[in-house]
Image (spheres, rainbow, N blue to C red):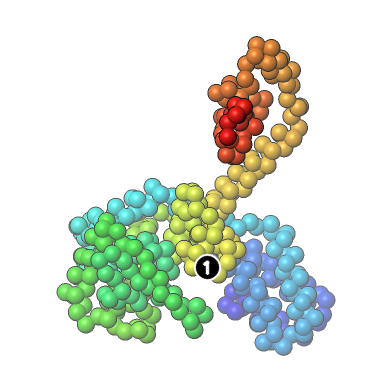
Amino acid sequence: MAFFASTLKKFSADDLRIDGMFDEFLDEIERSLKETTLAISTLNTYTQVLHAKLLMFAEVDERIRDEVKKGIRNIRKKQKKTMPKAQAINDAMIVQWLGNLDGYCTDPKSAPNLFKLGRETSKMAYKNGMNMHHMLLLRGFVWLTLVSGARTGEIRPLTDANIDEESMIRTIFKMKVTCHEVTSNLPPFIKERISPMIASIKQHAPKAELLFAENENKKGKGTIDPRLLQELVKGSMIANGMPPTSPGGYYRLHDMRKVWARWIDENGGSLESTTAFLGHSSTQVTYKSYFHDEHKDRLARKGQQIGLNHLQSLLAPPEDLTDRLAELRAFLEAGEEIYANGSFSLRHEIDRTKSARPGRWSKLVPAPRLELGTP
């Protein structure tokens, strides 16, 4: 409502019944859309709310609301804006980021104020330096989320009991009604980054029930406010020089799930295995939302090249077998065996094989002759 406030104040529901006033209304909407710097995805949401809710709340006729919807669609087409592609998070960025987190946990003073980088108005923006406990929480949260490909909401409510020497068990909720448990392995190189965090929690927050925190502490007392935890994650990404992880300039640890989709695909995994690992209901969800734009472009180029190679083979002239037939004729005239030691084949190199029949019945091996008088 705030975005369209100046326009909505100028017109009443009855004004939109008049052709000239209706056109002016659309002109005002077009001006607002041209002048804004909001992301395209945000504008799509705002315009949907305008014609589907705000105008309905103002008791604008359904026919007029439909005309507004069509008019906005035409405005967006004229503007010809395209959704900017978010830069993919590559492996070099991830390695550097994780290395920085290790450095922060070794020397917290080496870290800038990650809270302030994450949000200028953070209540922790005044701090001159970071403390070890916060750095250990940050690293543990990143590693547990990254190693499992989990949603952050599945990691925040973990307890000490969810982690043992070799694995982590988290709960995945479906529609907030049903749930099931998923186990993820924790190799030694990951466990050694988690254990210091758990030890720090026992020392600095002995009464905490959760390793991190659930929104509004719905599931028990945590160790850090969820917003502060998000600020730490975002600040660490910015400090590492990483680009936003999604369109609109957002930094989300959740988008590391797209990295998993790329890792699985680039190392021979199928779309089905990616879907199963990420816990999606269908492969359509995985491809549409978790294959990054650059990932999709690479698959498209690969698919086109396969098709072009096939098209080229269809248009190629038939193979000239004259020389091969002359070679075959020479072999036969010399009394050579065509397939002896795989010496000759018009199409394939074929090794000699034994007959599948028992030797005594093989056409290639004559049966022994019986002498007269043999019983």
In the rendered view, tell whether residue 331 sits above or below residue 242.
above
Circle 1 residues within 10 Å: few <14, some 14–19, many ≥20:
few
Residue visible at 61% across and 24% down in the picture:
339
Estimate the x, y position of residue 291 in percent, counting from the top left: 54, 57
Looking at the rendered image, the quarter that the C terminus falls into is: top right
Percent across and percent down for residue 259 are 45, 56
Q: In the image, what residue occupies the spot 27% across and 56% down?
A: 189
**Total count of labels:** 1
Question: Label 1: which residue?
Answer: 280
354 vs 283, nearest the viewer: 354
Residue sitting at 65 percent across and 14 percent down?
335
Percent across and percent down for residue 289 are 55, 62
Is 136 in front, or is 144?
Answer: 144
Q: Identify the residue at image location x=57%, y=55%.
A: 84
- Residue 356 pos. (x, y %): 59, 39
Query: Is residue 287 at least partly visible in the picture?
Result: yes
Q: For the residue marked with disc 1, what is the amino acid?
A: His
